[in-house]
């Protein structure tokens, strides 16, 4: 029997302020997420971010929380169940979260109990970043070593241009928009500090050095989050039949005062309304499961920004979640 481990980011246990504060502390103390010295990171997270951000984040989570729990966890579980059903009894599929429950350790123990002969790990992030992909790889490897499973572990690479991923995202968009009139399409990706891009550039001479650096194929591509995002957006736009005037790319969820990837989604949305774009569709292809960043940040706050600036309607296209075409794509990736 072959083991499959699907890993997503994670979620607070509940939308209460206490649970959100605990989640933020665990998440933001990861040195791959906030890459500053430990003492500075501890002070920043525990004395500033967690105390002041937790109540606001909890209020945001409360707006999207369902009777069955966290949307991200529900979609991730549905995906794992659908992949298990499609792959059949020759496979054992487990779900783990980098932060929170179910943990990566509990997922590995589940696979160990099933006596799998190998474990393929699929981090559910389309694009490479140290704060997502690498931390999953490192933490999973360390945990597997503790469980005596490291020798049967392998990792699947980011799937930003995978045909099945693109097709499933486009299928989700078509069923959601259903031919409705749309003036503009915006691909909003999760942001990263610019230093996260430049520090992993193996050439140290390419990333963010020119305006069109991501248009040039280079040695930096395998670790360049920004370039991979651009490739996803272009592949989706091409599949949707969009020309360059019909869509744009932006980055959301910035935190702190250091420079993050630009342009910023929360500034782009009002600008689009002021330019006369009345009906805008927003994709969030950095995520495979709808979560706080897609449902609340874009679906609620983003829509409010757009409408207040003069826009008529903003429609958020759901993530691939457990769309049948995405289930097929995951099965092909892991099998």
Image (cartoon, helix red, strand yellow):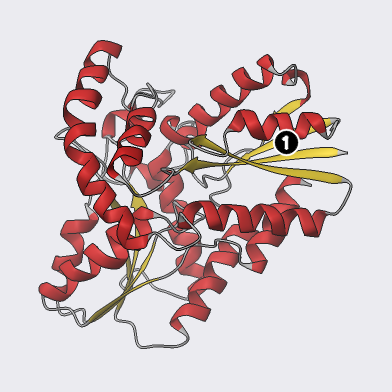
In the visual, does 243 lie left or right of 276? right
Residue drawn at (46%, 35%) of the image: 132
Residue at label 1? 120
158 and 254: which is toward the camera: 254
Residue 75: quarter of image: bottom right
Q: Is residue 163 visible?
A: no
| Side of 112 where 209 appears, left or right | left
Residue 119: image x %, image y %?
Answer: 76, 33
Q: Is residue 224 visible?
A: yes
Q: Residue at x 42, y 40 (%)?
A: 225
Q: Quadrant of the N terminus?
A: top right
Instruction: Indicate the position of residue 85 as horizontal and vertical percent values.
Output: 79, 58
Residue 11 position (above or below residue 271): above
Residue 55 drawn above or below residue 135: below
Where disc 1 sits, the SS reads strand
Who's the residue at 35% across and 33% down the image?
22
Residue count near mark 1 (Cα–Cα under 10 Å), binned few <14, some 14–19, many ≥20: some
Q: Position of residue 312 (x, y in %)?
A: 20, 83
The percent position of residue 235, horizontal first and vertical second, equals 50, 61
> In front: 47, or 265?
47
Q: In the image, what residue occupies the spot 67% across and 68% down?
A: 324
């Amino acid at each position: 029997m072959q083991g499959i481990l699907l890993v997503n980011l994670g979620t607070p246990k509940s939308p209460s302020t206490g649970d959100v504060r605990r989640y933020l502390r665990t998440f933001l103390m990861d040195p791959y997420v906030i890459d500053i010295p430990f003492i500075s990171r501890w002070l920043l997270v525990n004395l500033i971010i967690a105390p002041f951000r937790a109540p606001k984040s909890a209020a945001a989570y409360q707006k999207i929380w369902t009777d069955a729990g966290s949307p991200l966890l529900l979609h991730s579980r549905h995906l794992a169940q659908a992949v298990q059903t499609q792959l059949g009894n020759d496979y054992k599929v487990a779900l783990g979260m980098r932060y929170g429950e179910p943990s990566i350790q509990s997922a590995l123990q589940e696979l160990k109990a099933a006596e799998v002969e190998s474990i393929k790990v699929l981090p559910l992030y389309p694009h490479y970043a140290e704060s997502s992909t690498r931390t999953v790889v490192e933490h999973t490897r360390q945990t597997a070593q503790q469980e005596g499973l490291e020798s049967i572990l392998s990792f699947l690479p980011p799937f930003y241009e995978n045909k099945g991923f693109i097709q499933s995202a486009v299928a989700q968009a078509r069923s959601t928009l259903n031919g409705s009139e749309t003036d503009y399409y915006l691909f909003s990706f999760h942001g990263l500090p610019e230093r996260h891009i430049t520090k992993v550039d193996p050439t140290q001479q390419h990333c963010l050095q020119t305006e069109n650096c991501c248009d040039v194929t280079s040695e930096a591509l395998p670790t360049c989050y920004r370039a991979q995002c651009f490739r996803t957006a272009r592949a989706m736009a091409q599949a949707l039949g969009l020309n360059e005037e019909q869509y744009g790319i932006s980055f959301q969820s910035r935190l702190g005062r250091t420079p993050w990837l630009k342009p910023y989604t929360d500034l782009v949305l009002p600008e689009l309304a002021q330019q006369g774009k009345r009906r805008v569709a927003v994709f969030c292809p950095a995520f495979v499961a709808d979560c706080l960043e897609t449902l609340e940040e874009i679906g609620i706050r983003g829509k409010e920004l757009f409408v207040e600036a003069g826009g008529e309607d903003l429609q958020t296209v759901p993530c691939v979640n457990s769309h049948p075409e995405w289930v097929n794509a995951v099965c092909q990736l892991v099998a």
